[in-house]
Image (cartoon, rainbow, N blue to C red):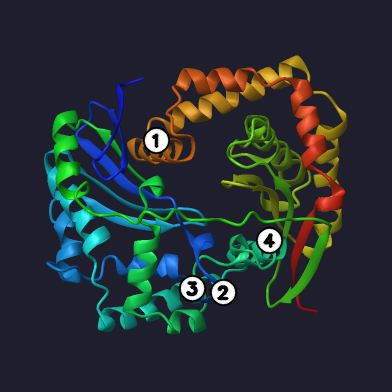
């Protein structure tokens, strides 16, 4: 592994840099706050803030922000999730200071002019409508709501047209100031940046800003009992999601569930759900499973898109695979191959500088450390068949499952 350096700026922002001998540098500011950190009257504000960071600062208008890196062949972007917001950039290594200055400017100096805010509301409403036009996307939004209830994790990241309508400059300023706490900020960088130059630039453009000193407080969600809902839609195929409460990031059982997910419905074409339901029976074009951990909880889900006449049989086949995990110990050969596959996928992912940058930032934010690949591989190879069995019995609990079905109107 190339050398990794971790240090802290004078205002408390943590920095992680991995040197990679490449012409392109990837860097990003990770803000450990997202849609779950909104108050009840702020639904969609985290995502809207991400959009409005690009709409003008004390020294730049929108055009100058959008052109600053694009003019030299670079990219500037951002995204919002349930528990995080990223502002990130990719560019040739000789433009490092240009990128860092720009990212600091939009993060700390965005002015949120009223006329730009109103225009951007229309853009986000169009984004919301694009989701409404896609049942494969909307089913996950509604599933989260069913699964988490009125908790912040159950709200859509985008908000609603009515919630957006109420947002103004002061709302954006207040929310930005609230989430910019040193405990929630990590700057991550990969590429051939000189470590001393990187430190100097970050201290100059990021380290001099005053940050909020009151950390965010989160309410842990609860999920008890079975929930099931069927919704009629003007669609042609059934969209089905089955989910269970799962482990949070800090849980020691997280690696075992990650391995189960990879075997069951991960990205490999040889995952069990795909081989059985798609390849053997031809019941579905798209079926997969997902394990999404959060800071204090998690969710394990299976998605299926199929013809209505195949839904019941597909559900039976899904439970046949889940029951196999709950009642049968994996053979030595099966777990050896599963470990090997997951380690290989991680290695392939490490070939992307952008992916490495995101992983470094999240690792430092969540665990305050950076594990080497060797440590990650060792943890995977330490997973035993008995541990897989115990985790499957704990997670795939029929008394705690949630189901959502989108089916065609009669």
Please tell me which of labels 3 and 2 falls first in the chain. Answer: 3
Residue named by callout 3 = 42
In 3D space, how far apart are the residues under numbered discs 1 and 4 (Cα atoms)? 29 Å
In 3D space, how far apart are the residues under numbered discs 4 and 3 (Cα atoms)? 18 Å
> Quadrant of residue 116 in the image?
bottom left
Residue 303 point in image, percent of width and height: 69, 53
**How many neighbours does mark 2 have within 10 angstroms: few (below 14), some (14-19), or many (20 or more)?**
some
> Quadrant of residue 194 in the image?
top left
> Quadrant of residue 192 in the image?
top left
Residue named by callout 1 = 360
Q: Is 396 or 130 nearer to us in this picture? A: 396
Dot label at residue 132: 2
Residue under the image location 44 percent in, 84 percent down = 165
Please tell me which of labels 1 and 4 falls first in the chain. Answer: 4
In 3D space, how far apart are the residues under numbered discs 1 and 2 (Cα atoms)? 34 Å
In 3D space, how far apart are the residues under numbered discs 1 and 3 (Cα atoms)? 30 Å
Residue under the image location 71 percent in, 65 percent down = 146
In 3D space, how far apart are the residues under numbered discs 4 and 2 (Cα atoms)? 20 Å
Q: Is 405 or 286 nearer to us in this picture? A: 405
Dot label at residue 148: 4
Q: Is mark 1 on a helix, strand or loop?
A: helix
Is label 4 or label 2 in front? 4
In the rendered view, would you say 230 is above or below 364? below
Q: Is 209 or 231 nearer to us in this picture? A: 209
Please tell me which of labels 4 and 2 falls first in the chain. Answer: 2
Cβ atoms under marks 1 and 2 closer than 8 Å: no
Dot label at residue 24: none
């Amino acid at each position: 592994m190339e050398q990794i350096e971790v240090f802290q700026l004078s205002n408390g922002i943590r920095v992680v840099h991995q040197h990679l001998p490449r012409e392109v540098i990837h860097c990003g500011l990770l803000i450990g706050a997202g849609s779950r950190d909104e108050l009840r009257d702020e639904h969609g504000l985290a995502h809207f803030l991400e959009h409005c960071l690009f709409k003008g600062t004390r020294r730049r208008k929108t055009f100058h922000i959008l052109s600053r890196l694009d003019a030299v062949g670079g990219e500037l972007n951002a995204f919002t999730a349930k528990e995080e917001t990223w502002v990130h950039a990719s560019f040739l290594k000789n433009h490092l200071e240009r990128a860092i200055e720009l990212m600091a400017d939009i993060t700390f100096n965005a002015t949120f002019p009223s006329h730009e805010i109103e225009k951007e509301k229309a853009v986000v409403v169009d984004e919301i409508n694009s989701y409404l036009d896609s049942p494969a996307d909307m089913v996950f939004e509604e599933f989260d709501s069913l699964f988490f209830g009125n908790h912040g994790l159950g709200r859509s990241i985008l908000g609603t047209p009515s919630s957006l309508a109420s947002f103004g400059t002061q709302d954006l300023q207040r929310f930005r100031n609230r989430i910019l706490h040193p405990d929630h900020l990590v700057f991550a960088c990969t590429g051939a940046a000189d470590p001393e130059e990187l430190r100097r630039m970050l201290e100059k453009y990021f380290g001099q800003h005053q940050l909020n000193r009151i950390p965010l407080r989160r309410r842990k969600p609860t999920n008890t009992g079975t929930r099931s809902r069927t919704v009629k839609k003007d669609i042609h195929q059934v969209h089905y999601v089955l989910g269970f409460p799962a482990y949070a990031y800090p849980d020691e059982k997280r690696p075992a569930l990650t391995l189960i997910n990879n075997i069951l419905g991960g990205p490999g074409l040889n995952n069990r759900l795909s081989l059985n339901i798609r390849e053997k029976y031809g019941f579905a074009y798209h079926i997969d499973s997902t394990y999404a951990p959060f800071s204090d909880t998690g969710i394990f889900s299976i998605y299926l898109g199929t013809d209505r006449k195949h839904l019941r049989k597909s559900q039976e086949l899904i439970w046949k695979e889940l029951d196999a995990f709950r009642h049968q110990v994996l053979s030595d050969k099966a777990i050896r191959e599963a470990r090997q596959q997951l380690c290989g996928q991680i290695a392939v992912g490490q070939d992307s500088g952008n992916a490495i940058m995101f992983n470094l930032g999240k690792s430092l934010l969540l665990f305050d450390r950076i594990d080497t690949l060797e440590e990650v591989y060792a943890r995977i190879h330490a997973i035993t068949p008995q541990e897989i069995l115990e985790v499957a019995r704990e997670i795939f609990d029929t008394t705690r499952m949630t189901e959502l079905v989108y089916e065609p109107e009669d």
